[in-house]
Image: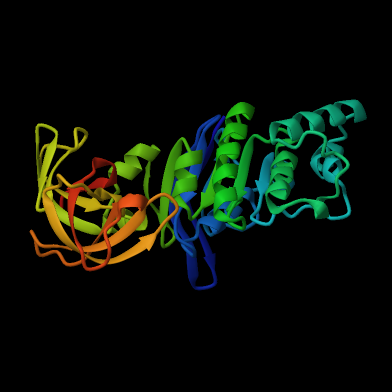
């Protein structure tokens, strides 16, 4: 079973929000639709669900055109940013809602609710009022409710964005586990690339209404489609390099990139591509520093090459001060390779 969107265009008057998008999701696959706010990703999700009309193109499930199929008959589950729980129902009542609509017998319904609450880490919460739950607990209930009728496709629209950073990271791990254990086919809309790469089997990067790149997380991370995609993924400094025998010679030194194609390439650097190292080949002046949870992010000006200000990272306990000089080395984990110009 699979979903296929072909040439989808969604317009609101003269504004084209989604433009000729092609997208496939295979059975049991989790795809992340990743892009900045306003790029059209939520509109695309709503169009796939049948909540927005398409101006051009088709949505198919197993080659069946869904154009005439109403939302409630598509067999899709939906989870939104705010969960949209029923405040007058307890946790069990929320999770069981779709099962009631399908007239599932009481005993089977109660067993399914208990199974799902265990799956999302809320054992024994059946009689809790949803208004008494934390934001993270409410999103777990919303996920259990969406999974209860065993949807053939689960659509999640920014399901974690309303939560604080630490809770988002934990719930992203939990959501990845739940989707894998349930064997759920899913499309997750997010602007957060950490979430996308945690959750997805494949990532589709969207910009200005179009999908500009689709691939496995490591492929998109290492080889962004263009400079704009690289910048969105945090790799903003672009340099020329030459790759031979799996090593790239750059103006900032040599770095091992065994997966990069041989010859002249362009590389893009994330902030962690340059790290403080007493044995590093790059000398730089520290212009600024910002303390993160597990490292210090530096703004530096290398003296060995005229590329202006760039980012680097240093350990929390050994970070240089503003005005000091620091030695830097290239870290392959922070380097992406761009298509040849």
- Splitting the image into 4 quarters, where does residue 184 fall? top right
Q: In this view, does 239 lie to the left or right of 212?
A: left
Q: Which residue lies furthest to the front in this view?
A: 317
Residue 241 is at least partly visible in this image? yes
Look at the image and tell me in which quarter the C terminus lies: bottom left
Name which residue lies at 24% across and 41% down. 332
Residue 31 image position (x, y, % from top left): 49, 40
Is residue 6 visible to us here? no
Which of the 4 quarters of the picture holds residue 203? top left
Horizontal and vertical percent for residue 247? 12, 37
Residue 264 image offset from top left, x and y in percent: 9, 45
Q: Nearer the viewer, residue 153 or 198?
A: 198
Q: Residue furthest right?
A: 106
Which image quadrant: the N terminus?
Answer: top right
| Vertical placement of residue 335 versus 41, above or below | above
172 lies above or below 82: above
Is the residue 226 above or below the residue 201 in the image? below
User: Is residue 241 toward the left or the right of residue 129 in the image?
Assistant: left
- Camera-nearest residue between 336 and 207: 336
Number of numbered tags placed on the structure image: 0
In the picture provided, is 228 more to the left or to the right than 135? left
Give the residue drawn at x 90%, y 26%: 107
Q: How is the image coloured?
A: rainbow
Q: In this view, does 329 lie to the left or right of 224?
A: left
Give percent across and percent down for residue 274.
23, 51
Q: Which residue is drawn at 68% across and 49% down?
A: 136
- Kindly identify the residue that appears in the image at 88 percent across and 34 percent down: 103
User: Which residue lies most toward the bottom here?
Assistant: 14
């Amino acid at each position: 079973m699979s979903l296929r969107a072909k040439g989808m265009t969604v317009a609101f008057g003269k504004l084209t929000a989604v433009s000729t998008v092609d997208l496939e999701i295979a059975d049991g696959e989790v795809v992340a639709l990743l892009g900045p706010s306003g790029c059209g990703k939520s509109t695309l999700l709503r169009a796939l669900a049948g909540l927005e009309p398409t101006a051009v193109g088709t949505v198919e499930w197993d080659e069946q055109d869904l154009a005439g199929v109403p939302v409630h008959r598509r067999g899709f589950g939906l989870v939104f940013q705010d969960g949209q729980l029923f405040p007058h129902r307890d946790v069990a009542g929320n999770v069981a809602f779709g099962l009631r609509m399908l007239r599932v017998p009481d005993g089977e319904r109660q067993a399914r609710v208990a199974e799902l609450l265990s799956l999302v880490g809320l054992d024994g919460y059946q009689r809790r009022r949803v208004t008494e739950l934390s934001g993270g607990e409410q999103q777990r209930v919303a996920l259990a409710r969406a999974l209860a009728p065993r949807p053939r496709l689960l659509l999640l629209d920014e399901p974690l964005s309303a939560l604080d950073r630490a809770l988002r990271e934990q719930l992203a791990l939990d959501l990845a586990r739940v989707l894998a254990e349930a064997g759920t086919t899913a499309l997750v809309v997010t602007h957060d690339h950490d979430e996308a790469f945690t959750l997805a089997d494949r990532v589709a990067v969207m910009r200005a209404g179009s999908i500009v790149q689709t691939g496995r997380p490591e492929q998109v991370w290492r080889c962004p489609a263009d400079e704009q995609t690289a910048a969105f993924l945090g790799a903003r400094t672009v340099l020329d390099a030459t790759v031979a025998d799996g090593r790239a010679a750059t103006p900032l030194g040599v770095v091992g990139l065994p997966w990069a194609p041989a010859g002249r390439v362009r590389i893009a650097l994330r902030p962690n591509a340059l790290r403080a190292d007493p044995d590093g080949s790059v000398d730089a002046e520290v212009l600024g520093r910002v303390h993160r949870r597990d490292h210090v992010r530096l703004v530096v000006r290398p003296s060995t090459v005229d590329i202006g200000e760039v980012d680097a990272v240093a350990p929390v306990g050994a970070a240089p001060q503003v005005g000091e000089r620091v030695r830097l080395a290239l870290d392959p984990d922070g380097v992406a390779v761009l298509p040849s110009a």
